[in-house]
Each structure stands twice: as C-alpha cells, then as structure tokens.
Amino acid sequence: MRAIRTNAIRSRLSVLLAFLAGLCAIAGFSANSALAANEPRPPLAIQFSLDRPIDAAAAPFVMAAAGGLFSAEALAVTINIASGSPDAIARVAAGTSDFAVVDINALMRLRDKDKQGGPRIKAVFVLFNKAPYAIIARKSRGIRALTDIEGKTLGVAEGDLSAQLWPAVAHQNSIKIKNVKQSSISAAVREPMLSAGQIDAVTGFSYLSAINLKDRGVPADDLAVLKFADYGCEAYGFAIIANPALAAAKPEAVKGFVRAVIGGLHLTVKDPERAATEVANRMDGGSKDLELERLQSILRDYVLTSEVKRNGIGAIDPARFERSIDQVAEEFKFQKRPQASDIFDDQFLPPLNSRLIN
C-alpha cells in the first residue's frame, strides 16, 4: 500500500511539474512577443519623386523630413527630382519611385493615353486644392483682365499644362482664341521675353512666373496675374500618387507617408519663414526671401482655400472633380472619360480632424 501511495504522489508531482513548465513556456512566449512588439520597426526605404526642382511648393515634404516625421512613421525617404509630371508618373508606374507629387490633370491625361494596360496609378492626397495655372501679363501692354488678351501676343511654353487648359478657360469666358496670337517659346525664356516686352503675356504657374518677374525687376504694379481659378476653372492641382503594388502590399506605409506630409504642412503653416529657409538651403543658390514670398502665395491661393478650411486638406469634392473633368474633356480628347474614383483614392487619408489646417 505504501508503494502504491508513493507512486501516486510521484505521478501527481510529475503532472504538476509539467503543468508549471507549460505555464512558464507560455509566459516566456508572451514576454518575448511583447518585447518583439515593442521593438522599433526597421525603416522602410522609400523613393519619392518631385516633378520639378525643389522650390517653395515642396515645403511640406522638406519640413516633414527636417522634422523627423517620415522617420517617426518608420519610413526612410529619399527625395529625387523628375523632369516633369510625365516622368514622375512613369517612375511610379515602373516602381523606381514609390511616391511622386504630380499635376493631377497630367495624371488624368496620361492614364487615358496608356494603351499598355499598365498599373492603374491613382492620387492618394491632394496638396493644391486649386490648380496654379495662370496668364501673367503686363498692364503696361494693355492687359488688366482676361478679356483684354484678345489682340495680344501670348507666349506659350511646350508641355505647359496652363497652355493646354487655356482654350477651355477662353471658351468658358467667351474669349475668341483665334484673336489671340500664340507664340511658342521655351520655358527658359518665358520670363525674360515678357520682361523685355517681346510678348504681352505668358501662360504658367502664378507663383513661379509672377514672382520670378518681380525678381527680374518688373514692377509689381505692372503685373496682371490672371489665375484660371478666378475665371471658372475648377481643376485641382498637385497631388501625391502612390505605386499600386506598394499601396496593395503595404497600405500602412502609404497612410504613414500621408500623415507625415500633413504634419509637414502643419509645420509649414505654423512657421513659413523656417520652411522657406529649409527650402532655400536645399536649392542651388536659393533665396529665403524669394521662397518665402512664393510660399505665402502658394498657401494663400492654392492650399488653404475655403474648401480646405471646411473639408480638410488632401481630399477632393467628387462633384467638383467631375465638373473639372467636363471642363478639360474637349481639350484632352479622352478615349474614355474618367470618373473621379478612377483618379483619386481616399482610403489612405486620416480622419477629418487630422486633416484640418488652422
């Protein structure tokens, strides 16, 4: 009987020891899992393309980098420069860039012309709530309003989206475009020719050409900056596009990138002088004062609009976007007219309270 009792005790002890060992193993696993969860994530390498050399328009991205906002999202972002929106879009399509900032109207046009069935790239964040297209003219040449352009010479640079949308704006404002003499010029001589009086006006971006002309010595009160947005053009402007494969495989990285850009914009709005300094420091011969003037124009006219103040930064108004597509449809000659949802994907945007800019 004593032997039976001893064996029974040993058996119970074995079961108890096995149970305790199991508990220890579970506890160890949980502790290791907790440690692993708390370990910092290795940063994801990201290539980001600007569609033109750095200037004040890049301030939110520069400030996001300078403020450590990309790294806080576990993103190691390298900024590269493309030769225009078509090149930047091609880089994202090929996967050599993960993100790019491009003209959303250029995206619309190139997507429609893509006959290769390539990746369907979409914008995930709109930075410029209005397109910066404009005609910049000399008042001394008799141009103070858009209707004054008839009978004048308009300098048009090849590939300039302002020029591509100009006929639609002219039609909308009952301007007879056949009465406007268009002179094809290089973008490099656009401002010099206007300042020299060789042409009466040019198409371009208001925050570039107008400020560049003032920097060349043209008096501010002699400049008429005729922004298309003031003449019925409902187009949006610059937007961030994402590589479709990255968006599908790593949606949190796309969301993190967008959050960092919004944070960079907050920093820009809070301290535009510092933002202009950061931008100028990254330019070849950049001027802080010139970029500050450019940045203030961008924020006032194209970023902090009444629509953004109501609806937050980054999104689109679908009804307005559809109207803008109708406005450009005749000039772009779409093979198949796109819908707003074909061009813009809002699933990566944070909630509204995170997108309000004060």
Image: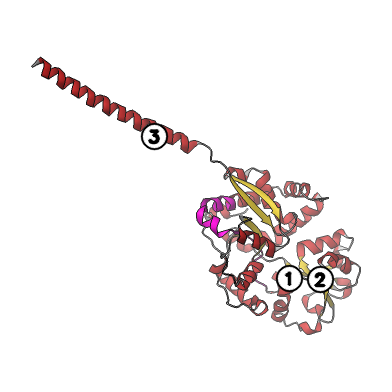
Residue 126 in view in this figure = no
Q: CA distance from mark 1 to mark 3?
A: 60 Å
**Residue 202, numbered label:** 2
Residue under pointer 3: 30
Residue at left 61%, top 55%?
Answer: 98
Instruction: Compare marks 1 and 3 and give the one earlier in the sequence.
Output: 3
Instruction: Compare marks 2 and 1 and give the one earlier in the sequence.
Output: 1
Front: mark 3 or 2: 3
Residue at left 62%, top 54%?
Answer: 357
> Mark 2 and mark 3 in contact (Cβ < 8 Å)?
no
Q: Is residue 49 left or right of residue 290?
A: left
Badge 1 amino acid = Ser
**Residue 300 sits above or below residue 285 on the image:** below
Q: Nearer the viewer, residue 87 or 264?
A: 87
Q: Is residue 219 left or right of residue 56?
A: right
Q: CA distance from mark 3 to mark 2?
A: 67 Å
Instruction: Compare marks 3 and 2 and give the one earlier in the sequence.
Output: 3
Q: Secondary structure at mark 3?
A: helix
Badge 3 amino acid = Ser
Question: Can residue 112 be found in the magenta stretch?
Answer: no
Tell me which segment is drawn in magenta: 233-258
**Residue 238, numbered label:** none
> Mark 1 and mark 2 in contact (Cβ < 8 Å)?
no
Q: Pointer 2: residues within 10 angstroms few (<14), some, or many (20+)?
A: many
- Return the x and y of residue 1 as percentages of the image width and height: 8, 17
Q: Secondary structure at mark 2?
A: strand
Badge 2 amino acid = Val
